Amino acid sequence: MSLRRSLALISVVWLAAITAVHAWLNTTWLSPRAHAAPDGSQRFRVGFLPVTCHLTCPVTDFINKNMDSGGFFEPIRFSGWPELKEAFLSGHTAATFILAPMAMKLREEGVPIKIVYLGHRDGTALMVHKSSNIYRIEDLKGKTVAVPNRYSNQRLLIFRALRDRGMSIDDINLVEMAPPDMPAALFARAVDAITSGEPFMGQTELDGYGRVLYLTKDIWPNFISCVLAVPEETIRTRREEVQRLVDGIARSGKWLDQTIDHRMQAAQFVSKHYYNQHPRLLSFVLSKPPDRVKYTNLSLRRKDFEEIEELGKISGILSGTAHFDDYCDPSFVPDDSVVPAYTFEAPSTEPKP
């Protein structure tokens, strides 16, 4: 065999080997049971981002893995909204935490999505540089403000805050930016203000160059950013698993809001095992102040979503063709008065990841 043919054959074999390894590690091409549970059933995968709005996802998983019941779903971390959304639309995840207006828009576009629970209340801030001359919302006029996404509630929050002061969204320069990039942009003065879910806003405050212009709890109490959503097909075929997930999130929320010590425990194990962030950052945003973000009162309230609908339609991101009964299924919401917090204290020894 000639040298050229030998090299060509080696190249083909090498390419095939690399493709096989990729398929084995990153897809289910070679194994339809790659994500199967120990009993052979398909794992219930739940998409989340490393933000406090989605904190109950890893907390529920960690607590159950360290209790007798064991883990009952597979949390899948994504780096941004586009990847998380596409994984959900493709069926890779059976449920996902997602921006409320984004879920509503998907329903308007014909996607059979249902919101079954909330992820949190509040948990957003608008930060400005500490040396800026911005001290009131009115001072944002003519300034550049970064938001995470066209369909983020942070965008609607700014729209609402400006409207309440006789201003419009046209009075500012609004840009979209991935939340992890926002702190550096504010530090470099590339933008005048940033707003997204935590912990990225708290990072600017903790590092000494960011100043809070407002916390959402002060201008839109019980603000909703992210929700837990599932496809209608999942409700039909895996209803018990959806209910177990919702119940787990409800119990985790009660546990997180029960004591500040529980929040500090969560900051440690979530940062290490799920978020890949420094624990001091999550500790800061879960305690400064403690009600910066809340994880109780997570039921689906019609009036909350109707307000988002109204603002979404006025601001041009929603058409108003889908309403509460179209995109919400409150049947999974447990009675908050009887939901018990998990009885759990994080072990001092190295726990299960």
Image (cartoon, rainbow, N blue to C red):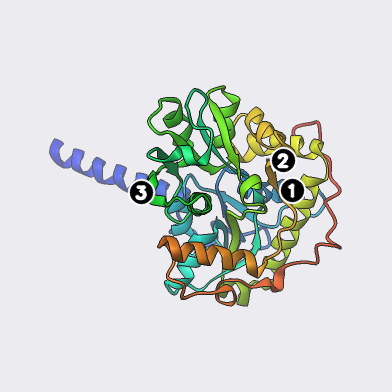
Quarter of the figure with the N terminus: top left
Q: Which residue is mark 3?
A: 19
| Nearer mark to the viewer, of 1 and 3 | 1
Identify which amino acid the numbered label 1 is placed on.
Answer: Lys
Camera-side residue of 233 and 296: 296
Element under disc 1: helix
Residue shown at the point (71%, 70%) measured from the top left: 332
Query: Contact (CB < 8 A) between labels 1 and 3?
Result: no
Identify which amino acid the numbered label 2 is placed on.
Answer: Lys
Question: Could you classify mark 1 by the number of other residues whose Cα lies within 10 Å: few (under 14), some (14-19), or many (20 or more)?
Answer: some
Q: Where does residue 313 sit, x and y in percent of width and height?
A: 45, 66
Query: Contact (CB < 8 A) between labels 2 and 1?
Result: yes
Against 294, residue 278 (above or below) is: above
Of the two numbered discs 2 and 3 on the same chain, state the one appearing first in sequence.
3
Of the two numbered discs 2 and 1 on the same chain, state the one appearing first in sequence.
1
Element under disc 3: helix
Identify which amino acid the numbered label 3 is placed on.
Answer: Thr
Camera-side residue of 24 and 331: 331
Q: Where does residue 47 sit, x and y in percent of width and height?
A: 56, 54
Camera-side residue of 217 and 323: 217
Q: Is residue 288 visible?
A: yes
Residue shown at the point (58%, 34%) measured from the top left: 212
Q: Which residue is mark 2?
A: 352
Q: Which residue is mark 1?
A: 65
In this image, 279 relative to 344: left or right? left
In this image, 76 relative to 122: left or right? left
Question: Could you classify mark 2 by the number of other residues whose Cα lies within 10 Å: few (under 14), some (14-19), or many (20 or more)?
Answer: few
Of the two numbered discs 1 and 3 on the same chain, state the one appearing first in sequence.
3
Quarter of the figure with the C terminus: top right
Question: Could you classify mark 3 by the number of other residues whose Cα lies within 10 Å: few (under 14), some (14-19), or many (20 or more)?
Answer: few
